[in-house]
């Protein structure tokens, strides 16, 4: 894959492609709909797109849920087209989300499937640690999730 990948804003017009990727990435669970992506992008929170040329190949979202002095944020979603995985796209998206969190000195939380070793490893490399277990968190699969936390930086 020699095409340059850029990270920038996610737009409402990207919603159908994001929903398509969700269905590929999370078939046993409740993937986000196009409307859920449109709502998220319109929410004022940070939603990013990774693009190879004009093709959307990844997306990510961060919600700030509490402001300073004890700011908190949640990574709501990260997804990368399976054909583009293992090219640093997820890492680049997460790094951009964490830059914003660090500017706010926010502690960041997320949930990740307990069986998603690649994602868990990515998060651990960015300073997240497992702080809890949510049984049967994902529906309808009933898969468990780890709650992970990255302490405030910056």
Image: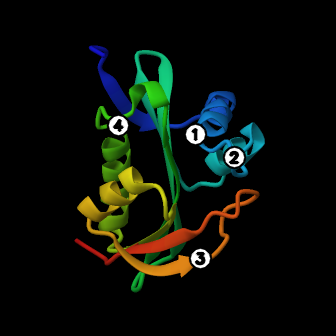
Kindly identify the residue that appears in the image at 67 percent across and 43 percent down. Answer: 37
Which residue, given by chain and number where applicable, does mark 3 sit on?
Answer: 134
Question: Circle 1 sits in a helix, a strand or a loop, which is it?
Answer: helix
Q: Determine whether, in the image, residue 88 is placed left or right of residue 75.
A: left
Kindly check if marks 1 and 2 are in contact, taking CB atoms under 8 A apart as contact.
yes
- Cα separation, mark 3 vs mark 2, equals 18 Å
The location of residue 29, given as percent across then percent down, is: 69, 51
Residue 25: numbered disc:
1
Earlier-in-chain disc, 1 versus 4: 1
Marked residue nearer the N-terminal end (1 or 3): 1
Where is residue 144, by image quadrant?
bottom right
Can the viewer see residue 136 in this picture?
Answer: yes
Q: Secondary structure at mark 2?
A: loop
10 Å crowding of disc 3: few (<14), some (14-19), many (20+): some
Residue ID at (49%, 74%): 147
Choose the circle earlier in sequence order: 2 or 4: 2
Q: Position of residue 18 (x, y in %)?
A: 61, 34
Give me the C-alpha separation between circle 1 and circle 3: 20 Å
Point out the residue furthest to the bottom here.
Answer: 69
Residue tagged by mark 2? 31
Q: Dot 4 corresponds to which residue?
A: 89
Question: Could you tell me if the residues under marks 3 and 2 are in contact, i.e. CB atoms within 8 Å?
Answer: no
In front: label 1 or label 4: 1
Give the mark nearer the N terminus: 4 vs 3. 4
Separation of disc 2 and disc 4 at Cα?
A: 20 Å
Looking at the image, is mark 4 or mark 3 nearer the viewer? 3
Q: Left of 89 or right of it: where is 37?
A: right
Horizontal relation, residue 102 to residue 146: left or right: left
């Amino acid at each position: 894959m020699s095409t340059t990948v850029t990270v920038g804003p996610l737009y409402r017009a990207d919603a159908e492609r994001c929903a398509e990727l969700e269905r590929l990435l999370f078939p046993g669970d409740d993937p986000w709909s196009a409307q859920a992506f449109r709502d998220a992008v319109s929410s004022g929170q940070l939603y990013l797109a990774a693009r190879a040329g004009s093709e959307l190949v990844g997306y990510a979202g961060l919600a700030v849920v509490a402001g300073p002095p004890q700011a908190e944020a949640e990574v709501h979603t990260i997804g990368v087209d399976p054909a583009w995985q293992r090219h640093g796209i997820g890492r680049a998206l997460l790094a951009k989300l964490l830059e914003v969190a660090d500017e706010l000195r926010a502690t960041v939380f997320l949930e990740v499937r307990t069986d998603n070793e690649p994602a868990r490893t990515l998060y651990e490399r960015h300073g997240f640690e497992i702080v809890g277990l949510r049984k049967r968190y994902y529906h309808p699969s009933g898969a468990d999730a780890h709650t992970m936390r990255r302490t405030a930086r910056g």
